[in-house]
Amino acid sequence: MPANDGAGTVAGQAQHGVKRPAAISAERGLDWFNLFVANIQTGFGPFVAVYLTTQGWTQTRIGLALSLGTITAMASQLPAGALVDMISNKAAVAFFSILAFTASALFFAWWPTPLFVYLAEVLHGFSSCTLGPAIAAMSLMIAGPRALGLRLGRNARFAAIGNGIGAALMGACGYYFSSQSVFLLTAALTLAAVLPLLPLARLYEPGRPASRREKSTARHREPIASVLTNRTLLGFGMCAMLFTLGNAAMLPLAGNFVTKRAESEATLLIAAGIVLPQLVAAAISPALGRLADTHGRRLVLFLGFCTLPIRGLLFAAFPNPGMMVAVQSLDGVAGASLGIIGPLVTSDVAANSGRYNLALGFVGFMIGIGATFSTGLAGLIADRFGNPVAFMSLAAAGVAAAALVWTAMPETRPQ
Amino acid sequence: MTALSSNPVRRIWSAIAAAAFLAVAGVSFDAPAQDRPARTANDVPPAPVKSGPPGPSYLEPLYATETTSILGKNVIGPNGEKLGMIADVVVDRDGRPRAAVIDFGGFLGVGSRKVAIDWNLLKFDTEKRDHTAVLALDRREIQAAPEYKADAESAEMVGPPLVESSSGDAGK
């Protein structure tokens, strides 16, 4: 681990309840870490298919590589969560996850051969499953359960900024240089992402107030079955799954339409459709996090989920490229609210069980199921019945998700 | 020359590939194609001798100046606008190319569409190995084409513009 020796004693002398310099630098470290992680993830998305095509890969093999990544990520969620629960130094987990990203990015850039690409997909799929929970766990350690909403709002703000910058930077790289340079840039960014981890590594020295929770959870763990059969967690997982089922295909479907219909500058319009929602998310995330702390998780999640059917109906009603980009910016509200409320509700349910990361893995698994089926189903519907029907079906999934939140999800905010 | 193909790393790789290729092609000069006896279906190549693995019975050169690999090659329009890249080639029953599947548009992989284009509308300049393929149609003529799906029972490709509606040279 980078530089965790010695520093802990300095911070360890600080008193509980006072904003210590170490705590402030940990907060800032987490801000930057969220930003860089979001940056890094940009290149591993749908861009992989573009890149492998430029490398002369056949479509069948590209499909195989992408499926391998998806399957790995799905299969890793729960085991990775259980693994992260067992490691008390979450900054170390984050560090090694980032190293795996470095390796994946370099494999893609330097050896786009099947062996290394499959390896890169597996590495990336697994380490995504350890990184997300590690970030949430570090947030919980820094903020504590009562102020976690605020902290997660901050995470979401910096992640959104990172997503926006990443998309712009890597899109420009791919356009003006080469698609290979996108992965070289990604690898360089993983090195930058290690720096903000330094203050976070210090925070987990034993005897620190922030790590008291971690120590207590390390002692006793609830059985895995009792965490995974928790009704609140199952219910929330269903909500998140339904929402993602409706949400994940919106952007690809809208983007496809823009490519088909835009008079000119279709590429710029799609880029705007990716970056604008991130600007919206960056602007409102802290407010959403605060709202979750003061007025409850249900309200924020419900507000966020409600934007999905609105978006679907507007897409169906006004099929026009410019309008689509504008409407897509609502995705910022939905994305931010799920990004904040997911780890928050999971913390309300499982923070004291010693199985927080396993529970996060479960939520991630449910979101993964929704995402996997979303694009396939929407594509089928769009082929058979046209885009408006596909958008309305996605909107219907959003209505179901919002209704489920309103009727079945209990408020979990600690009193 | 597009921005993508002028990237130095790609150029180096192309040069290495071409050099390796020429080395292989050079070896095969020992047995020029015209000296090779005509093969019939009954001709069975002699069984490989024990020393060494089995290999092809003869090799023919594929000159870098006359041939090119095409998967992933950039496609540009008549005005030099970058349209996309070749993702697949569709052949007919006799194995002759009928259509090129072009991955068209999009940003970082979002919103790109695969459309099939009549093979005859593509021109390849094999003089320079990393030259892009030139399509005789521009963006507007292919952007609304139906999405090509390899597993569908039937698909449609974009053909040359009809003579009366075209301005003349686009479909040649």
Image (cartoon, rainbow, N blue to C red):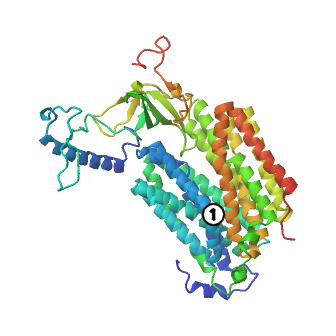
* Image coords of residue A413 (percent x, y): 83, 67
Residue that mark 1 sits on: A77
Residue drawn where x is 12% and y is 42% of the image:
B30
> Which residue lies most toward the top here?
B164
> Can residue A59 be seen in this snapshot?
yes
What amino acid type is highlighted by mark number 1?
Gln
Q: Quadrant of residue A368?
A: bottom right
Taking depth in this image into account, of A33 and A75 the one nearest to the observer is A75
> Which residue lies most toward the front here?
B42
Residue drawn where x is 72% and y is 53% of the image:
A241
B65 relative to B156 in the view: left or right: left
* Whether residue A133 is situated above or below residue A171 in the rendered picture: below
A52 relative to A390 in the view: left or right: left
Residue drawn where x is 55% and y is 43% of the image:
B107
Taking depth in this image into account, of A309 and A8 the one nearest to the observer is A309
* Image coords of residue A285 (percent x, y): 73, 58
* Image coords of residue A323 (percent x, y): 69, 36
Instruction: Give the chain letter at badge 1.
Output: A
* Whether residue A381 is situated above or below residue A131 in the rendered picture: above
> Can residue A337 be seen in this snapshot?
no
Taking depth in this image into account, of A382 and A279 the one nearest to the observer is A382
Secondary structure, mark 1, is helix
Mark 1: few, some, or many residues within 10 Å (few <14, many ≥20)?
many
Residue drawn where x is 55% and y is 71% of the image:
A95
* Whether residue A399 is situated above or below residue A187 in the rendered picture: above
Count up the numbered dots.
Answer: 1
A164 relative to B30 in the view: left or right: right
